[in-house]
Image: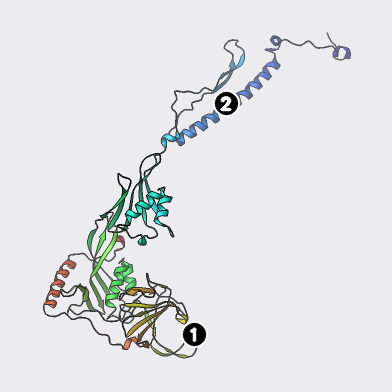
Amino acid sequence: MTNENNPVDNMKPRRRMSLGQRMGSPGWLFKTTAIVTLLGSALGLAAYINSTASDSYNAAMGEKVPSPYSLVASLGPDSSSGQPGLSLTAPIFDRDAPQVSAAEDEEETSPVKQAKVMRGDTLAGVLVKAGVELADAHSAITALSEHFNMRRLREGQEIELTFSPESEPTLQTIRLQPDVERAVTVERQNDGSFASTVQAIELAPHSTRAGGRISDSLYMAMQKAGVPHNVISEFIRVYSWDVDFQREIQPGDTFEIFFERFEDDAGQMVKTGPLLYAGLTLSGKPHSLYLYTPSDDKNPDYFDEKGHSVRKALLKTPIDGARLTSGFGKRHHPILGYTKMHKGLDFGASKGTPIHAAGDGVIEKAGMNGAYGNYVRVKHNGQFSTAYAHMSGYGKGIKAGARVRQGDVIGYVGTTGRSTGPHLHYEVLNKGKQVDPRGLKMPTGRQLDGPQLMAFKKSVQDLSVQIAAIPMATTLASNQ
């Protein structure tokens, strides 16, 4: 026996235990258990991560597929020795398990592409950007120009392109719709060239009757009723020869219209026909107008019930819903502070209210004009011109040299130049000199008589029957 307190005994070399002697000892069991536990934890964590990633991937593909890997770690007696040990099943790829490929779920590349013309784009640039070869783009555009004016290509124009389903697709067709009534298609021919055709788009006509009560202004009442903007402009134009919208329209007055609207296959209104009938009741007195084309005149016009044309050289007022804030003559200038001749009429209205040309003519000037601000002057004939000032902006196509028709929108109310607030300054010039518009006596239009008057009254009767058969709508907003 050795003495633990004897240093000599303690210096003697200890005999190493054999593996057989160590196995089964308490120390060996403790160390082995710790190592196996750590290894089992690591392997279990790896199996969990592998299974989770596989399941997540498969779930993202739309289905859950068991992981093709299996990894099992268990701590228990070895089947051969009966001693504690580690039983492992190594990671094995199951080739028979269902596999998922992302490529299988990808849709095939569509042979149809949609392109849109942006500001500053050319058609050739749009086609090339969409994948069309430059040579094909030029050939297709040449064919397209037979039925479509390239100068009318507008921003926002949508173009449909069809390609061949090859690895290197080539352009087959181009289709665009330049207006609501026709579509143009360019198609590749067997020899590789392109040819264009035009297809008419069928629109369904619907007779429409609407009306409403005026509480503020005629323009606002018709707008609230959902009447299309071009129909509102036409209605105001035909009454502007005889009605002073500033003084004669009162709250409680009513309007009525009858026209045709045209709808596409989706039931959306894409076009309106001319205003066939217009009715305006002022202070209880009805004023009815009918669109009619005399047999001896190719130009349609509006006539009252007695066959008298409403057309005159100049409109009575060029703006709807405005109030007269300053008349013609001397006045105390609100900005300059002294008495000055006011050579026109001022109509107060909200900014953006449309301003209509008082008569047919040619624009002499359109642009900034000193204290007038944004200014337009229209020459109607060798005697009369009209001028419009302080506008916030100009109507479409309004520029010097352009022709305008009576009632066309030439601008919008603003407060540019020397102005204290939104209003229209309106002038009538007789041989270059400003005159009071309210004192002018304008020649009246045509008076139907004889057979022409009889034919007109028959037309009015027929139209009245059509109008009576259509229910009155108080709003057209759902049809816009």
Label 1 to label 2, Cα distance in Å?
A: 89 Å
Q: Nearer the viewer, residue 90 or 382?
A: 382
Whether residue 18 sits left or right of residue 363 in the image: it is right
Q: Which residue does the numbered mark 2 point to in the structure image? A: 44
Q: Nearer the viewer, residue 218 or 457?
A: 457
Q: Which residue does the numbered mark 1 point to in the structure image? A: 335
Looking at the image, the residue that sits furthest to the front is 191
Secondary structure category for the residue under label 1: loop
Q: Residues within 10 Å of mark 2 (few under 14, many from 20)?
A: some
The image shows residue 366, relative to residue 98, as above or below, that is: below
Q: Earlier in the sequence, mark 1 or mark 2?
A: 2
Amino acid carrying label 1: it is Ile
Q: Quadrant of the N terminus?
A: top right
Residue 213 rendering spot, x and y as whole percentages: 29, 72
**Quarter of the image holding residue 470?**
bottom left
Query: Would residue 419 be seen by someone viewing this image from the given angle?
Result: no
Q: Nearer the viewer, residue 156 or 276?
A: 156
**Quarter of the image holding residue 122?**
bottom left
Residue 209 rendering spot, x and y as whole percentages: 23, 66
The image shows residue 422, relative to residue 139, as above or below, that is: below
**Of discs 1 and 2, which sits in the foreground?**
1
Query: Would residue 429 be seen by someone viewing this image from the given angle?
Result: yes
The image shows residue 154, relative to residue 164, as above or below, that is: below
Label drawn at residue 453: none
Q: Residues within 10 Å of mark 1 (few under 14, many from 20)?
A: few
- Residue appearing at x 34%, y 71% in the figure: 220
Amino acid carrying label 2: it is Gly
